[in-house]
């Protein structure tokens, strides 16, 4: 029995616990934490708990259909892997490992701009769909070069994240010395070194991998890959405006996905900009604290879009039943962030694999328990949402 097999690891929280044990505090809390008081981070998960399921009993399953289609890609179950920046710090397999496992499970992977592996290597690692997530770090010229590479490598959609005009205030990163540890000054790092030395296996693997990775997909002309320590400043100058979609559409002729929508109004603006899909997301509670939980924001976006684009959601998905609930409320699929990243931090590829096994098995079991044999049949009649939530399709 492997390290991640049952009964040691039976849910995502178990992987979270192992991730905490394997990685230094600064790495674990970067992954685990949210912005400011972490209200939105908690609410994302709590929103799922406030929804009850309404099962149909005695339903016979001939051929269950758990697969779905997202932007024309067949996914074996309705969950894709969200872009997670700095993945290579959590484990040296990083983005390549995540893409490979996504492909093995018949689902898609979204590569963050803030990635330590070359996008070509990531695409080669997976036999599933791969999308590229764009931050405008380094400016338009740098982004256009990345988009050219992504298209040539075979990435099939572009995800533009719109909720990051500045980096959120992640208090845990400040306390743990994230900036000092990524920075150039050895002197500034000294107070934070004990937490790295306390995780010798992670540290050895990190050093063997060459230490702090460079951003292989943000190539600054005349300088090469952007250094990780320069990312925060670059992100601070990278905000996207609606009018940027004019040039983004020219640079990326394929489908565009707008990620970070929380209101019907922004959903409509995204449609105006030609979005083929929208991700209802608050960045996993890492940007604007006290922003709406995504599950609560979902119905108004579904109503505003009214079938004119595909709707995905993320934030707080930790169980297969969460996926079912999101679909009942109108999402076509969910993105998972921390759920697989805990697995990655706990043990690279095998940890990610375990995370997906857990979520897929949970999802299929929940479908059977509610008596629904096909994702296309999930609707509001399978759930009970609190009275004060915006309503939709509840039959
Ligand atoms: C450690 C970490 C790094 C992230 N980096 C990015 C990123 O580079 N780009 C992006 O669009 N979203 C990023 N996100 C947000 C995720 O794509 C996703 O929206 C969020 O994780 C969903 O919430 P969940 O973690 O509760 O599943 C990141 C999230 C985490 C946890």
Image (cartoon, rainbow, N blue to C red):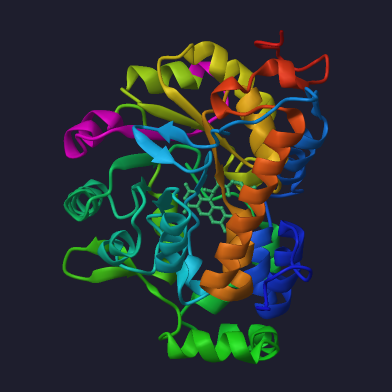
Residue 309 lies left or right of residue 374; in this view the side is left
Front-lying residue, 226 or 153: 153
Residue 320 pos. (x, y %): 68, 43
> Which residue is at the front of the view, 302 or 207?
302
Q: Quadrant of the N terminus?
A: bottom right
Pick the front one: 296 or 370: 370
Q: Residue furthest top?
A: 395
The residue range painted magenta reads 244-265
User: Residue drawn 56% across and 63% down?
Assistant: 353
Q: Position of residue 37 (x, y in %)?
A: 77, 48
352 to 258, vertically: above or below? below
Up-down: is 315 above or below 154?
above
User: 247 left or right of 162?
Assistant: left
Which quadrant of the view contains residue 112?
Answer: bottom left
Question: Within the magenta stretch, is there residue 294?
Answer: no
Q: Where residue 40 appears, x then y in whole percent?
A: 72, 40
| Residue 56, visible in the rendered structure | yes
Image label count: 0
Residue 8: x, y in percent?
Answer: 78, 71
Q: Residue at x 61, y 89 (%)?
A: 201
| Residue 257, magenta (yes or no) | yes
Instruction: Locate the C terminus and report the quarter of the image it occupies.
Output: top right
The answer to whether residue 177 shows anywhere in this view is: no
């Amino acid at each position: 029995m492997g390290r991640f097999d049952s009964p040691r690891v039976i849910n995502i929280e178990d992987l979270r616990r192992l991730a905490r044990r394997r990685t230094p505090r600064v790495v674990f809390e970067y992954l685990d934490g949210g912005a400011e008081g972490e209200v939105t981070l908690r609410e994302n998960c709590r929103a799922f708990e406030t929804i009850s399921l309404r099962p149909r009993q005695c339903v016979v399953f001939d051929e269950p259909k758990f697969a779905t289609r997202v932007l024309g890609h067949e996914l074996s179950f309705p969950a894709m892997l969200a872009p997670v920046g700095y993945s290579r710090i959590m484990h040296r397999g990083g983005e390549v490992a995540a893409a490979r496992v996504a492909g093995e499970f018949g689902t898609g992977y979204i590569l963050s701009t803030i990635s330590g592996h070359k996008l070509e290597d990531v695409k080669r690692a997976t036999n599933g769909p791969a999308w590229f997530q764009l931050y405008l770090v380094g400016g338009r010229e740098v982004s256009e070069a990345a988009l050219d590479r992504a298209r040539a490598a075979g990435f099939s959609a572009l995800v533009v994240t719109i909720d990051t005009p500045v980096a959120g205030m992640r208090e845990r990163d400040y306390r743990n010395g994230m900036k000092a540890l990524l920075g150039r000054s050895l002197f500034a790092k000294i107070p934070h070194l004990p937490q790295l030395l306390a995780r010798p296996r992670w540290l050895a693997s990190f050093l063997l991998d060459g230490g702090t990775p460079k951003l292989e997909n943000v190539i600054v002309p005349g300088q090469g890959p952007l250094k990780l320590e320069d990312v925060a400043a670059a992100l601070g100058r990278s905000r996207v405006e609606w009018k940027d979609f004019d040039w983004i559409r020219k640079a990326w002729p394929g489908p565009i996905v707008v990620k970070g929508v929380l209101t019907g109004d922004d959903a409509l603006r995204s449609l105006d900009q030609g979005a083929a899909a929208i991700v209802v997301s608050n960045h996993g509670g890492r940007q604007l604290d006290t922003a709406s939980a995504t599950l609560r924001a979902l119905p108004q976006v579904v109503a505003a879009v009214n079938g004119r684009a595909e709707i995905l959601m993320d934030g707080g998905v930790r169980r297969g039943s969460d996926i079912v609930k999101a679909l009942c409320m109108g999402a076509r699929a969910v993105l998972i962030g921390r759920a697989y990243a805990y697995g990655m931090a706990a043990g690279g590829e095998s940890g990610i694999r375990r995370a997906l096994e857990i979520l897929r098995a949970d999802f299929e079991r929940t479908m059977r328990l509610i008596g629904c044999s096909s994702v296309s049949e999930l609707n509001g009649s399978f759930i009970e949402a609190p009275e004060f939530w915006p309503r939709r399709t509840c039959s």
